[in-house]
């Protein structure tokens, strides 16, 4: 491995940039502290606002032929912009990604399972921006049980933390 420059993300992980292009399509890798040969990158954290719930998406599908498609496209682009805004340099082509989701709501009116549907838009947005090449079994190793928090007066949002190889 070539030595290169070090970029510090807000998450406190060192990213070793280099000119070569390894098997995952990234320009560099992060070395985990004390682990020889490790190529784990992350954790990275970003916050995204304005994602629809499952009930809102179903209502859009039933309401008009193209409304749900537009809603999905808008939500996916929203995630992509949130990732690009939160990370100074977006990692590309990650595999074996592990996720943690925290959903913050102003009230308890929306059901947890409907809120957790936002995960679909988050994965699609990460694919759109190039963090993962796909959102299949090879790219997503799993996720922790989601955390739901109620904060009165806030706008509903999701805080996503992920790491990968």
Image (cartoon, rainbow, N blue to C red):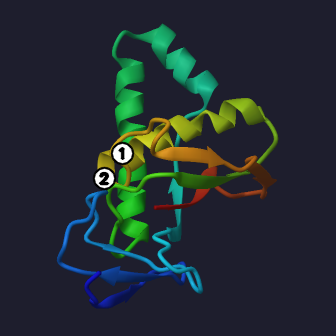
Residue 89 appears anywhere in the view: yes
Residue 68, above or below 19: above
Q: Which residue is mark 2?
A: 130
At label 2, counting other C-alpha atoms closer than 10 Å, the crowd grade (few under 14, some 14-19, many 20 or more) is some
Q: Residue furthest left?
A: 19
Q: Is residue 42 left or right of residue 70?
A: right
Q: Secondary structure at mark 1?
A: helix
Horizontal and vertical percent position of residue 49? 53, 52
Across and down, in percent, residue 28 comes to 31, 74
Name, please, the residue furthest toward the front: 36
Is label 2 in a helix, a strand or a loop? loop
Q: Residue at x 79, y 45 (%)?
A: 107
Q: Nearer the viewer, residue 12 or 138?
A: 138
What residue lies at 36% left-to-right and 23% top-to-bottom? 69
In the shown orientation, is residue 127 left or right of residue 157? left
Determine crowd level at label 1: few under 14, some 14-19, many 20+ residues with C-alpha closer than 10 A: many
Above or below: residue 30 compared with residue 134:
below
Q: Nearer the viewer, residue 152 or 149?
A: 149
Mark 1 lies on residue: 127
Mark 2 and mark 1 residues within 8 Å of each other at the beta carbon: yes
Q: Is residue 14 above or below residue 117?
A: below
Q: Is residue 110 visible?
A: no
Q: Nearer the viewer, residue 66 or 30?
A: 30
Q: x and y percent of residue 159 in the render?
A: 61, 58
The residues tagged by marks 2 and 1 sit, at their Cα atoms, a distance apart of 5 Å
Q: Position of residue 143 (x, y in %)?
A: 65, 48
As rendered, which of 31 and 161 lies closer to the eye?
31
């Amino acid at each position: 491995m070539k030595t290169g420059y070090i970029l510090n993300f807000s998450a406190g992980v060192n990213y070793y940039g280099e000119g070569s292009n390894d098997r995952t399509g990234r320009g560099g890798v992060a070395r985990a502290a004390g682990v020889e040969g490790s190529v784990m990158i992350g954790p990275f954290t970003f916050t995204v606002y304005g994602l629809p719930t499952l009930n809102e998406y179903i209502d859009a599908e039933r309401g008009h032929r193209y409304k749900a498609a537009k809603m999905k496209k808008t939500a996916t682009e929203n995630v992509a912009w949130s990732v690009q805004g939160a990370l100074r340099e977006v990692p590309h082509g990650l595999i074996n990604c592990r996720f943690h989701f925290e959903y913050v709501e102003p009230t308890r009116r929306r059901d947890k399972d409907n809120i957790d549907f936002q995960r679909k838009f988050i994965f699609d947005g990460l694919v759109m921006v190039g963090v993962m090449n796909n959102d299949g079994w090879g790219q997503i190793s799993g996720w922790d049980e989601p955390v739901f928090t109620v904060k009165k007066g806030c706008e509903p949002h999701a805080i996503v933390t992920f790491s990968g190889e």
